[in-house]
Image (spheres, helix red, strand yellow):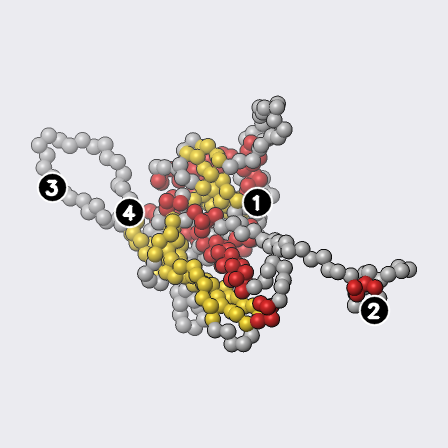
Amino acid sequence: MSFSNTFDTTNTGSGVSNREDLTDVLTILAPEETPILSSANKQRASATFVEWTVDSLSAPSTAGISEGADVTAFTDQFAGRAKLGNRVQKFRRDYMVSDMQEAVDSVGPAKIAQAEAKAIRELKRDVEATIAGTQDLATENGAGTANALRGLGDWLDSAGPADVPAAFRTPADSIYTTAEANASPFSESDLNSIISSIFRVTGSANNLMLVADTGLRQVIADFARVSAGATENIRSVNYDGNSGSIKLSVDLYESDHGVVSIVNQNPDCAPSFGGNTATGSGYIVNPEYYGIHELIPMGSTRLPNLGGGERGFVDCALTLGVYHPGAHGVIQDVT
């Protein structure tokens, strides 16, 4: 048996005098990036329902005008104008540190300032998960239902939402539904088809950003390794023999209709299509055509200390403005 009970500090023996080796390193094991929120333009809101107007141009005419013809008919240039909107949703995270905890030394440390900072980081993830979600908007009814914003996944729907006119909905060609286990997984030609569909709506695709979950990011990386086709041949690549590494990850994808930057989606904030938690989903967004409207900017409020310790909360109230649903695309993994 052991001579000294170093493994047991709860009973008598030499182990009770062993010093604790606790470093000052504090590690938070959770993804914190918020690419959709961070890339959005920020604007001020002044009501709990934010609205914006959308319009389109008529099809080009190639008909000629006869010499001497008078103008006898006139066109209402605003007949196709529509109004879209989204509800402002309130977000909140609270924090508290006891008076005893505030007084003692701790790893981290674990004071009121650190609690406040952590709550803000959590609040940003709440916002990212909500604007990236697939939920529809909801209206406060005074009976338990709070205002809720419509997520990006619900905006990008070729069949709806019902309050979005058909002319401004996301084209079906800009939406791809994939299952990782099916016979025809997402391919490079599928990605090009979505980008081309977006280009046909906006006429520009140079500002596109693909926010990809882990599974989709790996599929796109394989575009550099495997050639398209039924045989799935390995693609040949040339590299510098003096280099010690080969880079096959894809950060910029150059398509026929523009360059798409590819960023990682926060896996904790990834949308769930069809109630599934697959990792092959992603949004292709143009930051020029969506934004965040803030009714209450993100901030912190300290509450009175009633004797137990410092406390407070961080909050914000905002909504997602999708100025033209047709300017974006989505890859839905329903595995």
Q: Quadrant of residue 64?
A: top left
The percent coordinates of residue 318 (x first, y second) are: 40, 59
Residue at 56% from the left image edge and 35% from the top image edge:
249
* Place of residue 176 in the rendered image (x, y in percent of width and height, measured from the top left): 48, 43
Q: Residues within 10 Å of mark 2 (few under 14, many from 20)?
A: few
Crowding around mark 1 (Cα neighbors within 10 Å: few <14, some 14 to 19, many 20+) is: some
Earlier residue among tags 4 and 2: 2
Instruction: Say the numbered circle drawn on residue 12.
Output: 2
Q: Which residue is mark 1?
A: 214
Eye-nearest disc, 4 or 2: 2
Mark drawn on residue 72: 3
Q: Secondary structure beneath disc 2?
A: loop
Q: Position of residue 335 (x, y in %)?
A: 57, 48
For disc 4, the marked residue is 55
Identify the secondary structure beneath mark 4: loop
Against 214, residue 241 (above or below) is above
